Amino acid sequence: MSSSESNPQPAKRTAIVSPVTIDAFAVMDAAKAKAEAEAKALSQHSHETAADADAAVGHDDDDDDEQEVEDKDDGSPAASDAPDWVDFPEDVTEIEAIHARIRKMEQLERFTSLESLVLKQNLIRRIECIDTLTNLTELDLYDNQIDTIEGISTLTNLTILDLSFNNIKVIQGLEPLVNLTKLFLSQNRIKVIEGLSTLTKLTMLELGANNIREIQGLDTLVEIRELYLGKNKITAIKNLGHLQHLESLSLQSNRIVTIENLDNLPQLEQLYLSHNGIQEISGLDANTQLSILDVGSNRISRLANVGHLVSLEDFWLNNNRLENWADVDLLRTCPRLGTVYFEGNPIAKDSAYRRKVKLALPTVFQVDATPIRQN
């Protein structure tokens, strides 16, 4: 008899709060307003991407730090005073209330068996009333209106914490959460990477879409496998030497002009550097495990320093300035190369573009978004 048969695990008890019913026309109006806001934000951000990267490096724009925070309103009915979980049994192990117009975390203290609490896409402003939930391993407060990390110091069994899409400015109050393995803080208003030194079990850290200018505060996070820092204001790749287990590094949409300081990352498999101001591929001599290299939407005019990447499978050089077909031949020494993106380069205007890529790189089975037809 197997151990699982002799010692059966108790069944999970999940309580799900149904999303509120929303008036269709109100949703359409809200969606239109949101789309207009996002378009405006995207237009503002475009001035800091590849097209203006070198100018952005010297430009100091903090306007987004001072934006007024408004209540999210999608046209749904007003929130009820009574919490949606008031009638749930005390021994429930999972509570999920998504897009339920919840404004306060209250009357949760009695759910001491709770292991997963998912309250994303609500209107919560403060983390509270959960200090007794010491069995929690997952807390998901994605897309709320939280501005301060607080009220979670007793939740030392947490392994996953998601506070993305909130209004947080400072990383604080996480020191006791020593068992965290995944931390999501994207789309906040964070300026400095700090307060993470005790989280030595982290394997994934998501800090994309903030106001971070410098890579720092990561020296003790030696177990990190995935690090996401895209859409910030970072000007230099540095302070990553201690992350020797790092497998995936994302730095898209920053202000980087040079690929550097990656020598101590021998296990790096995925590197995303699109939408920066990079003019040449360099600094990858030690990164022979790379299987994905994304340098799309930069300012690269010549292809060099890639022939040694024998594990490379996907190479994205779209929307650059490559015009010399001889440069493409340098990728012949990458025996695993299967997908390349060259669209948006001068060579892509050649009427025989796809045929020439296939002749130059016989292992490739996809050019841009289209598979190569096999004869």
Image (cartoon, rainbow, N blue to C red):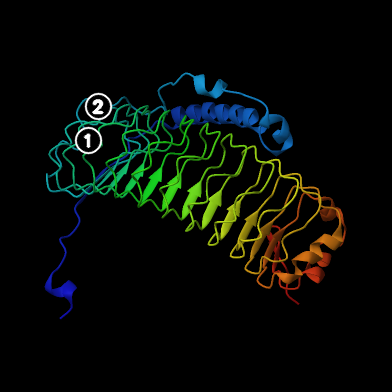
The residue that disc 1 covers is: 84
| Residue at 20% from the left image edge and 30% from the top image edge | 106
- Compute the Cα span from label 1 to label 2: 8 Å
Q: As shown in the figure, which amino acid type bears the numbered disc 2?
A: Ser
In the rendered image, the quadrant that contains the C terminus is: bottom right
Residue displayed at 29% across by 50% down: 179
Circles 1 and 2: CB atoms closer than 8 Å:
yes
Q: Secondary structure at mark 2?
A: loop
Q: Is residue 281 left or right of residue 109?
A: right
240 left or right of 295 in image: left
Is 195 on the left-hand or right-hand side of 316?
Answer: left
The residue type indicated by label 1 comes to Asp
> Would you say residue 233 is visible in this rendering?
yes
Q: Is residue 290 left or right of residue 15?
A: right
- According to the picture, the residue beneath numbered tag 2 turns out to be 80
Identity of the residue drawn at 42% across and 53% down: 222
Instruction: In the displayed orientation, state which residue is furthest to the bottom.
Output: 1
Tell me the element at label 1: loop
Instruction: Where is residue 267? Give x, y as percent.
Output: 53, 62
Q: Position of residue 244 (x, y in %)?
A: 49, 57
